[in-house]
Image (cartoon, rainbow, N blue to C red):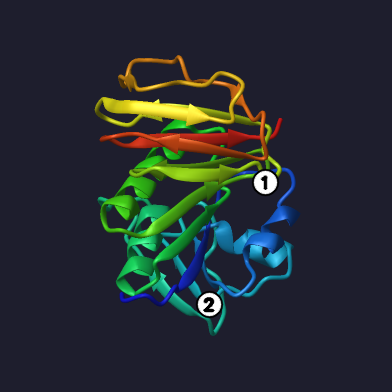
Amino acid sequence: MGNEVKKCAVITGAPENDINYYHSYLIDRYIISADSGFEKCVNIGIKPDLIIGDFDSSAKPDTDIETITLPVMKDDTDTFFAVKEAVKRGYNDIIILGGIGSRVDHTYSNILSLNYCNDLGVSALLVNRSNRIRILNSSCVIKKDGYNYLSLFALFEECKGLTTKGTLYNLTDYNLSPQCQLCQSNSFVNDEIEISFDCGKILLIESND
């Protein structure tokens, strides 16, 4: 993919009361609607570049927009297929909008989509109005950026040597196991925090409610 950043947004069909926040995430992004995510696009006046879905929960749109119709019985969810299609087309900065919903299984599936991207070196976020989720596999600086709380979870395996600076509850050289909930609901003390660790992956969940 080289050094060029190619941005994409995948709009899911998860029910949400307010989706106007989408606009701030769609600037200069190729837009893919996944199944009934097309209805969300219509509701906020956005025309997607690509429509993907099996259309079991909504009617197939009658439009001239490029559309990939999936079988109802398939291995991937509509959203995961959309993410994989985005990667296939060379997009390396992907935001999944609305994929945190009332269906916990769908939300977890979308977290696994983040991990799929992470393993390919593709930047990915899972976002709704109140939360932002991403995977860290190296040390970084996180800006407060409208989110008051953050939780860190070791993803799949132990995260070793975890150190945080700028949080209410700082850690130093801590080995965080996948079962540990010690790092849930921490908060920012500074406008930026430093997160460093020696190995493993961290699921970072930022919340503003």
Relative to 133, say whether 162 is above or below. above
Relative to 61, is 53 on the left or the right?
A: left
Q: Position of residue 42 (x, y in %)?
A: 68, 67
Query: Which image quadrant is residue 197 in?
Result: top left
Distance from the alpha carbon under mark 2 to that under mark 1? 29 Å
Label 1 CA crowd tier, 10 Å (few <14, some 14–19, many 20+): few
Q: Position of residue 65 (x, y in %)?
A: 53, 81
Secondary structure of the residue carrying numbered label 1: loop
Q: Is residue 99 visible?
A: no
Please report the residue visible at 59 percent of the width from the left and 31 percent of the height from the top.
Answer: 166
Is label 2 or label 1 in front? 1
Relative to 5, say whether 13 is above or below. above
Q: Amino acid at mark 2?
A: Asp
Q: Amino acid at mark 1?
A: Asp
How many numbered circles are shown? 2
Q: Position of residue 8 (x, y in %)?
A: 49, 68
Secondary structure of the residue carrying numbered label 2: loop
Instruction: Name the residue tied to disc 1.
Output: 145
Instruction: State which quarter of the image contains the C terminus.
Output: top right
Residue at the farthest bottom position:
64
Of residues 149 and 21, the one drawn nearer to the viewer in this rendering: 149
Query: Residue 49: which numbered mark, if any?
Result: 2
